Image: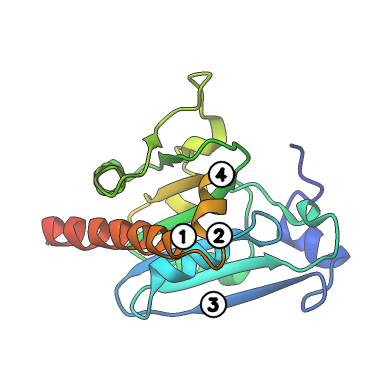
Amino acid sequence: MTDKYSCFEHLSANESRGADYEIVRRLGTSGIAVIGIHGGDIEPWTSEIAEAIAGPDHSFYTLKGLKKTANSDLHITSTRFDEPEALEIVSRSKTVISIHGSSEEEEFVLVGGIDTTLSRCIEAKLQQAGFKTSRTKKDGKSGNLGGRDKRNICNRSVRAMGVQLEISKGLRARLFRHGEAEAGRALLDFVRAVREAVEESGKEGR
């Protein structure tokens, strides 16, 4: 997909904050930031997943698409995402976890980012919780979905490294299947797995 806007300045000159998109941010005390730069109706449920993982202690940021149609217009790829409030949060954080959505119907999480210690810990915890994970797509490639580019916003932390989680459309649908107890448990299990990985990796780093 080719982005309509090459940077946030271009987007904000053509879209209205509060009508077409909104930005939500909350500063935590842990030194960890969990972000969803393609939230709202750009990549549905990624804002909610990021906020749930952030909880009360980690910093949280999301840009949400609010348009009635064509929310994909608000997508700025991770290597060019330069919204100032997001950059401020990630530049002050030791670790960044960036939550995205991919289009596959199969239920899986593509785990990437330069912080391989944390990403492998997250991957292990998710697998233990019963979620399927991968480091490449079916074609053996991951491209931008791998989160390995230094310009990727997940890698623009104090330590110049972070983690990117691409959650498939199929899995996001299960996590937010309203009214079903199984869906609620699945979301709790997912959030718990990621938070436990962050906590364990933090202890190992101390």
Residue at the disc numbered 2: 177
Q: Quadrant of residue 127?
A: top left
Three-letter residue code for mark 1: Ala
What's the residue at 76%, 44% (across, down)?
Answer: 3
Q: What separation in Å lies between label 3 and label 4 (alpha carbons)?
A: 27 Å
Residue at image mark 1: 183
Q: Residue furthest top?
A: 139
Q: Which residue is mark 3?
A: 25
User: Which label sits in the foreground, 4 or 2?
Assistant: 2
Name the element at disc 3: strand
Q: Is residue 8 above or below residue 152?
A: below
Q: CA distance from mark 2 to mark 3?
A: 26 Å
Tell me, for residue 127, which label it has, or none. none
Q: Residue at x 65, y 74 (%)?
A: 23
Nearest to N terminus: mark 2 or mark 1 = 2
Q: Is residue 151 visible?
A: no
Q: Please, what is the three-letter code of the amino acid marked with disc 4?
A: Gly
